[in-house]
Image (spheres, grey):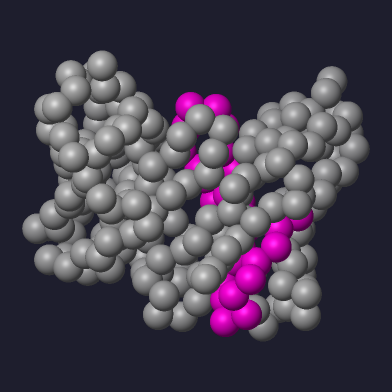
Amino acid sequence: GESVGLHLPTLSVQEGDNSIINCAYSNSASDYFIWYKQESGKGPQFIIDIRSNMDKRQGQRVTVLLNKTVKHLSLQIAATQPGDSAVYFCAETYTNAGKSTFGDGTTLTVKP
Amino acid sequence: DGGITQSPKYLFRKEGQNVTLSCEQNLNHDAMYWYRQDPGQGLRLIYYSQIVNDFQKGDIAEGYSVSREKKESFPLTVTSAQKNPTAFYLCASSYDADTEAFFGQGTRLTVV
């Protein structure tokens, strides 16, 4: 069946360092991937997305990389700030799926 | 302001009682979703609806029911058949299944 998982459940970084959060997916038919950020007690918020016809997409301080060969997705956060502390989820879906599949989440802690 | 609203934020119920969680969106989105999140865990899909008057079971639909009589509303009923209903419930909507989801702030249900 489909599954989306994360390699590391927790990540601790120093303020100002770059962070990399990884995600593996198993459905080779997946063609749309999204990263969400969830702060404590709140609903997830969209960060960045990427479609399967791209390998890389950049936003403000964030970059998503997609490697379809090994079915791997990563989120890079540049110059990590205390406000980046949250749980990060990847999600994947495919055309006409009607729904997304979420990974388990990685907790990012930024040390001052 | 456009958005998705869940109410109430906190809800307490006695065991054996049905309870309905509200979810309203004014984003004109066709698709709506209900997720359950347990402490330290990811999101599990309960029900989803791609269009008004239609909905499908997700991965953990047992003990839950929904309706989609209006485009902007997707209420979730937690029935007495749900064995362990205490959890954080998240509602989301999206333009369609191939675009990012917008989440509400969640309802924390405690059954005593």
A41 w.r.t. A90: above or below: above
B92 w.r.t. A24: above or below: above
Residue A20 location in percent, x, y? Answer: 82, 49
Residue B19 location in percent, x, y? Answer: 15, 32
Is residue A34 something that shows in the picture? no
Is residue A39 something that shows in the picture? yes
Q: Quadrant of the N terminus of chain B?
A: top left
Q: Which of B53 and A17 is in front in this view?
A: B53
The residue sitting at 60% across, 61% down in the picture is: A4
Q: In this view, does B9 lie to the left or right of B65?
A: right
Residue found at the very far left of the displayed protein: B69
Q: Which of B104 and A73 is in front in this view?
A: A73
Residue A24 falls within the magenta-colored stretch: yes
Q: Is residue A28 left or right of residue B61?
A: right
Residue A91 location in percent, x, y? Answer: 56, 59
Q: Quadrant of the C terminus of chain B?
A: top left
Q: Give the range drawn in magenta.
A: A22-49
Residue B104 location in percent, x, y? Answer: 37, 41
The residue sitting at 40% across, 80% down in the picture is: A96
The residue sitting at 57% across, 63% down in the picture is: A3
Q: Which of A102 and A38 is in front in this view?
A: A102
A21 w.r.t. B99: above or below: above
Q: In this view, does B70 lie to the left or right of B86?
A: left
Numbered disc total = 0
Where residue B63 sits, quadrant-wise, is top left
The residue sitting at 18% across, 40% down in the picture is: B81
